[in-house]
Image (spheres, rainbow, N blue to C red):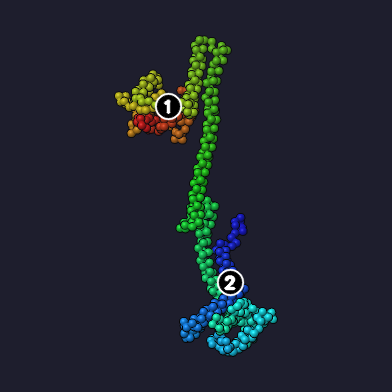
Amino acid sequence: MSNGKIGIRHSIRTRLLLGFLAVISGMIAFLLIFNAAFSEMFYENSKRRDMREAYTEISRLMEDYEQGKITQEALGDQFDNICLKRSLTALMIESDWSTSYSNVGNYEVIVGRLQQNLMSDPEQLDADNVIKLLEKNDDYVLQKFYDIKFGDEVVELYGSIPSGQTILLRVATASIKDTMSVMNTNILIVGLLMLGIAFLFAIFLSSYISKPIRKLSEVAKRMSVLDFDAKYTEKDSSEIGLLGESMNEMSRELESTITKLKSANLELQSDIENKKKIQKRQEEFVSDVSHELKTPIALIEGYAEALRDGIADDEETRNEYCDIIIDEAAKMNSMVKQMLTISQIESGKSELEIERFDIVKMIKALLTSNSIKFNKEGISVRFDQRDECIEVFADALKTEQVLTNFITNAVNHCKYDKIIYVHLTQQDDFVRVHVENTGDSIPADQINEIWNKFYKVDKARSREYGGNGIGLSIVKAIMAQHGRECGVVNTETGVDFWFDLDCNKGV
């Protein structure tokens, strides 16, 4: 292991391969050991069972022959079949010790042994370790001994049959051992062949099983570094395929969750930035309010002290001082009212009362009420849509306030030709109201700032007409409350302020 990564000591493919080979090798070893330890005993027991069965079949066969049911030729054939299918040697001995049937040569020696056995006590022979008695009953004796003549251990059965003959059946244990040797050789050959086949099969199977697991590992590794394009694409209906699909689903969920977290983080950062901006604006607001109130309060304080100290000796001067105090107090009162208005709108405490009204009629009334101011400033007003009727859906009082602020702003900044143009452009679902005045253009770097509270393009001139920079911010807040736009563009001769109103009740 290095760099904090987990190293693979033995791959799944290697483990599967070694596992298969270990199982097959163990099976072969078990078969060889089992065959060496128990097969000879099983095979010997099988031969003893064959002898008992052969004894019974020969007894029945001789009865059939004695009763004339089969011929002598058939007797010989069937006798041979009984012995051959069990690999037994057999002797049929008559009462005079002559041999009526034999399938082994040198049977005289065997007959002599039989005579010795019949005249001896089998249990005594067994006690002397000459013969091992295996089974004894009234019909036959089954025993095992080492035949010096044949140089081999022999298992034999001898006894009388109902027809009066004596039967002797025997099998050499050498054949049993030879059979065991052949079986061991066959098991070893077949086992090695199976081991080779198992090796090839294990290579194929381990590759088949480990391939999707390796791909799952690669997918998981890529997912760990947030690469969610990694997908398990194998078509597999097994548990591995289900795991792969689960990992794909987990990848999609992780990607979605991380995306949401990133989005939430961006929103949080945006909220933090907005809070910083709001905090900054609040600080600027307090600073601006303090600055705006500082001058009128200082003037009021100064002229009030002058009146108290009797500096103004004549009535005309006193009246002038009083007018200045009243004028500054009126400006402060207007600013406080505007601050309360925008505070109520921004806090949501001032609700809209939507109604249908004629915007042309409202404009005409406002232009008429401001005619004295227009005449005083030498301003010419042009509104060519006086005879039309255009109905809109909005809050009438707040719409009137927007118009009033735009008209007041136009009057305060009107220069040169001193003309104010008022006109409306109607589209599908809204009406755009324009209030344009001749005069200086707004600098491009300030055109988006004029909607901020207390912002003034020309601070010196604002002081002349009592402007405090709140009027346009009130317009912006009212239009945002209506869900409609407002804006300003510089024209060739001046500045054009505009706002939109709904003219479709369904909007």
Q: Residue furthest right?
A: 128
* Percent x, y of residue 47: 57, 77
Report the number of discs: 2
Residue type beneath disc 1: Leu
| Displayed quadrant of residue 353 | top left
The one of 301 and 131 positioned closer to us in this rendering: 131
2 vs 1, front mark: 2
Helix, strand or loop under label 1: loop
User: Residue 31, which numbered label?
Assistant: 2
**Image position of 345 (left or right of 52):** left
Count residues near mark 2 (Cα–Cα under 10 Å), then give few for <14, some for 14-19, many for 20+: some
Image point 48% across, 86% down: which residue?
Answer: 72
Vertical placement of residue 229 versus 144, above or below: above
**Image position of 121 (left or right of 496):** right
Image point 36% across, 23% down: which residue?
Answer: 362
* Percent x, y of residue 282: 53, 30
* The C terminus lies in quadrant: top left
Helix, strand or loop under label 2: helix
Image point 53% across, 23% down: which residue?
Answer: 293
The one of 406 and 378 positioned closer to us in this rendering: 406
The one of 186 and 63 positioned closer to us in this rendering: 63
* Percent x, y of residue 2: 61, 58
Q: Earlier in the sequence, mark 2 or mark 1?
A: 2
User: Residue 398, which numbered label?
Assistant: none
Residue type beneath disc 2: Leu
Vertical placement of residue 302 versus 384, above or below: above
Per the image, the residue denoted by label 1 is: 352
**Image position of 266 (left or right of 491):** right
From mark 2 to mark 1, how far is it between C-alphas? 97 Å
